[in-house]
Each structure stands twice: as C-alpha cells, then as structure tokens.
Amino acid sequence: MKVLAILYDGGKAAQEEPRLLGTVENKLGIKEWLESQGHEYIVSSSKEGPDSDLQKHIVDAEVLITTPFHPGYVTRELIEKAKNLKICITAGVGSDHVDLNAAVEHRIQVLEVSGSNVTSVAEHVVMSILLLVRNFVPAHEMIERGDWTVSDVARNAFDVEGKVIGTIGAGRIGYRVLQRLKPFDPKELIYYDYAPLPAAAAESVGARRVEDLKDFVSQCDIVTVNCPLHEGTKGLVNAELLKHFKKGAWLVNTARGAICDKDAVAAALASSQLRGYAGDVWNVQPAPKDHVWRTMKNPLGGGNGMVPHYSGTTLDAQSRYANGTKSILENYLNNKPQEPQNVMVGIGKYETKAYGQR
Ligand SMILES: NC(=O)c1ccc[n+]([C@@H]2O[C@H](COP(=O)([O-])OP(=O)(O)OC[C@H]3O[C@@H](n4cnc5c(N)ncnc54)[C@H](O)[C@@H]3O)[C@@H](O)[C@H]2O)c1
C-alpha cells in the first residue's frame, strides 16, 4: 500500500522538538510502523503546481493524509487523477480542502480526527477575545518600543465582563468557547446554529439561540466564528452582514479564513465598524506576504490579533491527531469500521448531526 502524507515543513524546530509530530520531519510518528508492515510512506510539503509531490504521487497512492495547517487542496481534478485512492485522512479537524462531492462520486472515503484539537482551538478563541477586548497587542508593542503612555492603550481597552458574546456555530468548539466564557460574567451568551443545542447543554452555559443571522450579529459586542467552511458559509461574514454588526464590535475567527470576506473585514476595521479582528485561519495558506490581514489596523493602530494557523496544532493536539490518524489507518488495514464521528460523508452531515454525536 502506498501512503502519501502532505504535511508542513518543521525545519530546525521539528529536529529539536520530536513532539512536532505533524511535520514532514516527524511524519506523524507512523513511519516505522507503516514501513515495518511493508507499506510505502511518502511524506512531503510539496503541494502546489503540476510538479509537486502531491500531483506526482497521487496517481498511485491508496491513502492520502493531509492537514488543515498546510492544506493540500484535493480538487476534483486531482481526485480524477487518483486512480488508486481509497481514503483521504485529515490529520486534524476540517476537511474543506477536499472536494467532498467529488470524493463521494469516486467512492473515496474522507475521514478526519474529530474532536482532536477542539479544546486547543476553544482556548485560542478565548485568548483572542481577551487580547482584542483588552487591547493587548498595541500595549505589548509599546513596551517593546521602549515607550510608556498608558492612556494611548487604555483608551481602547475594555472588560469582557458585561458584554454580549455570540458564536456562529455551537458544535464541539463553539460550545467549549461558551463554557469557557461563562465564568467571565458576560451580559449574555448567544449562538447562531441551525442545529439547536439540547436544552440541558444550552441551560448549563446559559446560552440563548438567535435564529436570524443579522439579528444575531446586531446583538453581539463580540462575535466568534466556529462553523465549518462549506458552500453555505463561504463569505458568510461579508460587507452586507458587517453593516448589521454593532459599531465597534470585535470578531474572532479560528474556523476558516474564507468564511469572512478578506477585504470587507479590512475595510470594517479601517472604518471602526469593527474594533478588532483576530484568528489564525486565512483564505490562502500560507498567506502571501502582502495579505491585508497581516497588517490591517483600526484607526488607533490596534485591533489585529492575526497569527499563523496554529491554534489546533499545539503539541498536545498533535499527539491526539497523530494517534487518531494511526487508529484510522489501523481500522482501514484491518477492514474494521471507522468511528462514525470521523467519517465526513459530505455537507449533509452538518445538517443532520445531533448534538449527542459530537
Ligand atoms: N484553527 C484551527 O486550528 C481549527 C482546528 C479545528 C477545527 N477548526 C475549524 O472549526 C470548525 C468547527 O469545528 P468543530 O469541531 O466545532 O465542528 P462541529 O461539527 O462539532 O461543529 C460545527 C457546528 O457548526 C454548525 N454549522 C454548520 N453550518 C453552519 C452555518 N451555516 N451557520 C451556523 N452554524 C453552522 C453545525 O451545525 C455544528 O453545530 C471546523 O470545521 C474547522 O473548520 C479550526
């Protein structure tokens, strides 16, 4: 069996830190295990263009492992070239880089390690909310510059306490964000999701569901995006929706970059419609050097909490998704059924999934 993995280059860091499992150097920790059973295991970061390893090796690979952190885009065209491909495994959560419709048509199973990094992301969301609301980044930059003008940073710093905080998507990550925010004593926690939370889950965090998206955003001081990227969410937060946000709201998106319109977000920040935007996901990854989200600012020179895509790839998360990838491979090799929550069968899954399955 030929297994192809497209992972990110870890360089010196991966040589020094073996727990960086999701890298080309450390190969998800499964190289010896796979090769000892006679399988071929190709690992590379080369994913763009006709001469990339992804294009070259997909032709006869039986298993493809990709990761959202350095997405190997599995397009319809690529799937049509992949005559021997049986399963695509996402080492992590979120398989929007795979054309799920084409995969279903070609009877290729797409699996991901559901739940493996949801706590890691939820913590990052809470951190990003705090750093935006409290104006942390400009305050730290001031210290590095050698300056000390408290009023310049305090003029745009607030408390999370007493704010209305809402999540678009109240699944594994969104719900964990609500749980973690409750002790901050917000004015209210609200959510927008076409699957309602079970009454007991909603009650335990005190979250109210709002069914209309414009109505939802107009009530929030802080909005966080925690839904998957699919046809229904691409560009969901666009110039039109941003008009309905409260003036000066904060927006945190660690779900997928393309859910928020790049230029509309930058314009909303420049006009103070948004006071801040933070996240780790970008419409193209790696983000080009001149991507507007790298440097955009509010008129007071702050409001940018962007980082590379790493919230779900902490060392703790890498251990979980590497183990999960191995379990999926073991099931495949032994003809055992996969865990249902790991199977991505297409977009319909999100419309029918019950909370209890999360
Ligand atoms: N930044 C990272 O490192 C990282 C890591 C893991 C996951 N993610 C992203 O976070 C997403 C959510 O992960 P999860 O584990 O919570 O998934 P999940 O499936 O448990 O929850 C997603 C929720 O979004 C809801 N939803 C779907 N479409 C919606 C829409 N149009 N409007 C409102 N709600 C909608 C679903 O009903 C579900 O409740 C993933 O799909 C992935 O894109 C990012």
Image (spheres, grey):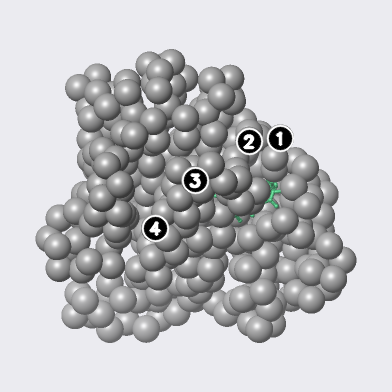
Asked which quadrant contains residue 62, the reply is top left
Q: How far apart are marks 3 and 4 (CA)?
A: 18 Å
Question: How would you rate the neighbour count of disc 4 (Cα within 10 Å): few for under 14, some for 14-19, many for 20 or more?
Answer: many
Q: Is mark 1 on a helix, strand or loop?
A: helix
- Residue labelled with disc 1: 348
The residue identified by callout 3 is 334
Foreground residue among 350 and 311: 350
Circle 4: residue type: Ala
Q: How far apart are marks 2 and 3 (CA)?
A: 21 Å
For disc 2, the marked residue is 345
Circles 1, 2 touching at the beta carbon (< 8 Å): yes
At which x and y percent is residue 344? 60, 40
Please state, as top left, top right, bottom left or bottom right, where the C terminus lies in the image.
bottom right
**Toward which corner of the image does residue 210 lie, by quadrant?**
bottom right
Secondary structure beneath label 2: loop
Task: Please give the residue where the numbered disc 4 appears in the rendered image.
Answer: 322
Mark sitting earlier along the chain (3/4): 4
Dividing the picture into quadrants, the one containing residue 38 is top left
The amino acid at mark 3 is Asn
Which label's residue is closer to the chain start, 4 or 1? 4
Could one spot residue 154 in this view of the protein?
Answer: yes
- Real-space Cα distance between discs 2 and 4? 22 Å
Q: In front of the other: label 2 or label 3?
A: 3
Dot 3 falls on a residue whose secondary structure is loop
Discs 4/1, front: 4
| Front residue (pair 179, 212) | 179
Q: Distance between the residues labelled 1 and 3?
A: 28 Å
Does label 1 or label 3 sit earlier along the sequence?
3
